[in-house]
Amino acid sequence: MLKIKDLQAQIEDNQILKGINLEINAGEVHAIMGPNGSGKSTLSSVVAGRDEYEVIGGTIDFEGEDLLDLAPEERAHKGIFLSFQYPVEIPGVTVSNFIKTAINESRKGRGEEPMEAREMLAKMREKSALLEMDKSYLSRSLNEGFSGGEKKRNEIFQMAMLEPKLAILDETDSGLDIDALRIVANGVNKLRSKDNAVVVITHYQRLLDYIKPDYVHVLYKGRIVKSGGPELALELEERGYDWIKAENA
Amino acid sequence: MSDEILDEITASDYKYGFTTDIESDTVPPGLNEEVIRMISAKKNEPEWMLEWRLDAFRIWSEMVEPEWPNVTYQKPDFQAISYYSAPKQKKELGSLDEVDPELLKTFERLGISLDEQKRLSGVAMDVVVDSISVATTFKKTLGEKGIIFCSMSDAIQEHPELVRKHLGTIVPKRDNFYAALNSAVFTDGSFCYIPKGVRCPMELSTYFRINEAGTGQFERTLVVADEGSFVSYLEGCTAPSRDENQLHAAVVELIALDDAEIKYSTVQNWYPGDANGLGGVYNFVTKRGLCERNAKISWTQVETGSAVTWKYPSCILKGDHSVGEFYSVAVTNKYQQADTGTKMIHLGKNTKSTIISKGISAGKSHNSYRGLVRVGARAENARNFSQCDSLLMGDQCGAHTFPYIEAQNPTAQIEHEATTSKIGEDQLFYCNQRGIGTEEAIALIVNGYCKEVLNQLPMEFAVEAQKLLEVSLEGSVG
Amino acid sequence: MTDLAQDLLSSFLVAESELNGSKNLGVVTLRKQAMDRFEKSGFPTTKDEEWKYTNLKPVLKQEYRILLKGDDAVSFADIKQYLLSDLDTYKLVFINGKYSSWLSETSHREFDVCTFAAALNKYPDTIAEYLGKAAPEGATFVDLNTAFADDGAFVRVKRNQTVDKPIEVLYLTTDENGAAFSQNRNLIVVEENAEVQIVERHQNIGTQPSFTNFVSEVFAAADSRVSYYKVQNDALHASLVDNTHIKQERQSNVHVGTYSFGGKLVRNNLHFYANGEHSESHMDGVTIISDGQTVDHHTLVDHAEPNCYSRELYKGIYLGNSHGIFNGKVMVRQKAQKTNAFQQNDNILLSDKAKVDTKPQLEIFADDVKCSHGCTIGQLDQNALFYLRSRGIPKKEAEGLMTYAFASDALEYVKIPQLEKRLNKVIANKLGINLEFAL
């Protein structure tokens, strides 16, 4: 589904990604771990299309199409979803209005008819129940006054509503206590199918107890320096990142 | 936002930037008693009207132009402005077919269609172009209910008792510098009278246009709603692009007698000055309403543009149980400056006022809200709720709120809330990632933000207002 | 200098060498310096800005025993009601300042739940790294506690560990031989990505007055999560000065809930130091007090780093001639851009003689921040009250219903259901309402 070849990207003359190679197929869950500053968030921003980052080499193909040609909203229409590490607030726009606009713009982008109001409402109720969110969230301004945990839950709620093909979760676990973590992980797991894929970016093993990865990659200094199965994450948990740093000094 | 998009937007022509080639009848620039006599004579005004103007002129001559700490502008030269300009008319207008076709074309370009479609939707129009009313539709239909809706010039001729009784009672000549100026040289405007117990069946509307270079626009409007009546009045303005600043000093007086209600809505789209801040419109307006017992006045406005705006629609809640409301969206972009707000003066008992002000600043603009809520010593049980929100688009604009609360009665309940929020690259990218393009995102954000105010506008205006907001904020972030 | 201060000085000279940690030079020096500072400053008076509304004199003029002895006679049955008996928890119980092993239940697996005394004597590295690093020097009560504190709770949670059960910390006073002045200290270290829940309580189960000077230092490392609940429902002859200082690293999330119902004079000094980006600080509380009681909440959130979030909600209901004080300070340093700080203090006065002094303070030195503070003091909405009564609900029950809803609002973030239930019961009791009757 997603083919990243030798991806290099920089921000303000500072090269962060130095040649990323990654292949993700439908139905798979990949975890990307790494110490702070290794380029994890940069990778997700570049795939989502943030223009602050300049791609200076390599390619990203999504379902056979060159992603780098497309604007961020076009990538979203193709089915790419990024759960932000630090979701921003948008005052005056309610959660329900925002998600309604997002869904219908995506449909428009794919040449489909907008979703009927009744169907939309039913879906919102279903997904907010899935994430154990009080209905009152739907009429609050997007992320305004939300605690960190509430913001992360809201991100996964949006993911549940948009049903993307490729979901990238950027440090979704940070700030969540054990109960909230379970709810969010449950939400993500319920959405998994053989037709979609999930990339979980995290610093800690904790989330991977609940969202079990098929592959684990370690990102260090802008490159994937190690790949393996779920046991790799457990090893990192025990030994920390120092041995990775030493191996790749 | 990339530079190319920014260039494209600022270079695109102001939508209504064109001029009409109509023979104009202009008085040479300058302001003195002679000019005033000339204006009065041209309009065939009765003696009492001339005297009223001269009195105002004398008062104005002794006044000093006010200074506003939060707004900077180049002071207009009052002697360099021409105070009268009217497109020449061939004869008295009986019906629309007799209107100068050039003029009609102008109206069409402005998006004002005087055709059957408008007629069916029931909007009576009084179009003011360069100081003379050209067409007054529906005069007959309204006349059947006893409703008077005509130009001020006509009202002075045909309903002198009404005009004389109410003119200047809410905004006296002495009230402020620009009101005095207006009282001396106003050339036209609208007059509206709703008789006792009558509910005006349609929305009354007026459009403005400033055409001639160097012409100030001095409109005078008077709306009187007699006991138990109701009227909804719409006012909308557009202006062409010019290099010199153009002066607009209007006065609007609203009188709501016992149990009456006046809804006054304005959608204003002034030329904002070009990308370097040159050539916009100076907008100094005094708008005030008086409520008698149980009466209600609502001011709703959506304002964009204008190089310098100074405007304080206010309500005097004189009668017991009267209600004053103010809903406003003020958008500033590029180099615009706005100093706006409202005054609610509570005098009677059990009066209530609501203020919802939404300011949106973009580019390098500055938006100030200045609100006064005054509760008089005998105003028992006064209630006020004010919500003043500012939305900043990008990093270089500013918003300031100055609420003044003067309560001299201990039973007053006054609530004030103010919030400031910011829209930047981060918010737009967030929307992009969710499949919402940048233009749609700005529209979504701005409309969500202004919802409360836009809901107050008559539907027709609301749609135009929404579009106006979107257009005026294009390229505002980045 | 007050008599109590004199007594303390002389007691220190006597006891200094016997205190836990007296073999650790670092600790000894720390104690000595703290005592020197206390000697110079003495106890604060109402002339000090921070104590303007809170008069310590009545509490200070009492004669206290300073060096206390433990009490073996206390059994589990005696203290059951002060614990969450329907929940399996770790327990650290102290009587008259001394650890009671037979009443406690500790752990030394992936996390240490044991005593401050043990830490002082056996973990010099930990002590060197953390002791005194959260609570600032120069605060009188903190200095006094630093000089004297001999025991208390020590909790250390290693990185990535989640403590599987809540930890209950109970400080009891039983001394029948005169009024007691006790000083205990908590040291709580939560390492990276670790999680812990603590429920703490001070209880005087004797008949003599008591005065407790308590310090709790909490260190929350990056990505850690701490829930800290203080239940203050002590006897009416017990007074407390609680100094809790929380140092937060990046992306940590700490919630302190303070529920004040008992005691004669309770002063809570709660300070959060947001030392890392994207951290979250939550502090909330409910105060319901009556005749002769004074509760003073002095809070501080110090935003030193950008992108942090702090939320404060304190609700108070004052009956009889009680006295409530709230002073909430939010400091946003110049570096702390994009700070989001919310503070709300709502109070209801149910009697003409009750008094509330509230002062929010915002000191903001950064320009891209979102800070709000709100405060209300009022009586119950007469219209709503009348509405309930017109539907047949008697005045007292109606008042109870409205105040109950008002107070339990602040329990929203309590994560332990048994604790929340308990607190709701106490609130209902205090407001004289029948819980089945309420929603």
Image (cartoon, rainbow, N blue to C red):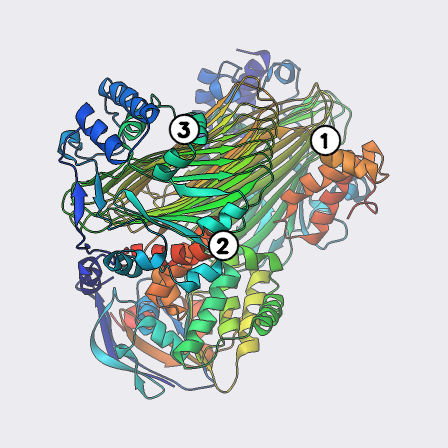
In front of the other: B239 or C372: B239
Label 2, label 1: how far apart the Cα atoms are: 32 Å
Residue at position x 55%, y 67% in the image: A184
Left or right: where B248 falls relative to C244: left
- Is residue C302 visible from the viewing direction of this image? yes
**Type of the residue with mark 2:** Ser
Element assignment for label 1: helix
**Residue B239 location (% of width, % of height):** 25, 49
**Compared to C102, does A201 lie above or below?**
below
Locate residue A119, reporting x and y percent: 59, 74
The residue carrying mark 3 is B167
Determine which of the numbered discs, if any, sits on residue A141 in the image. 2
Q: Residue at x 49, y 40 (%)?
A: B298
Does residue C213 appear in the picture of this structure?
no
Q: Is residue C43 above or below residue B131?
A: above
Where's residue A223, x and y in %? 28, 74
| Res. B173 image quadrant | top left
- Graded by Cα atoms within 10 Å as few (under 14), some (14 to 19) or many (20 or more), the crowding at tag 1 reads few
Q: Residues within 10 Å of mark 2 (few under 14, many from 20)?
A: many
In this view, the residue in front, B361 or C433, is: B361
Amino acid on which the number 3 mark rests in the picture: Leu
Whether label 2 touches label 1, CB < 8 Å: no
**Spatial distance from mark 2 to mark 3, Cα to Cα?**
46 Å
Chain letter of the residue beneath label 1 in the structure image = C
| Mark 1, residue position | C382
Occupied quadrant, residue C258: top right
Towards the viewer: C144 or B219: B219
Spatial separation of the CA atoms under disc 1 and disc 3: 45 Å
Q: Chain of mark 2?
A: A
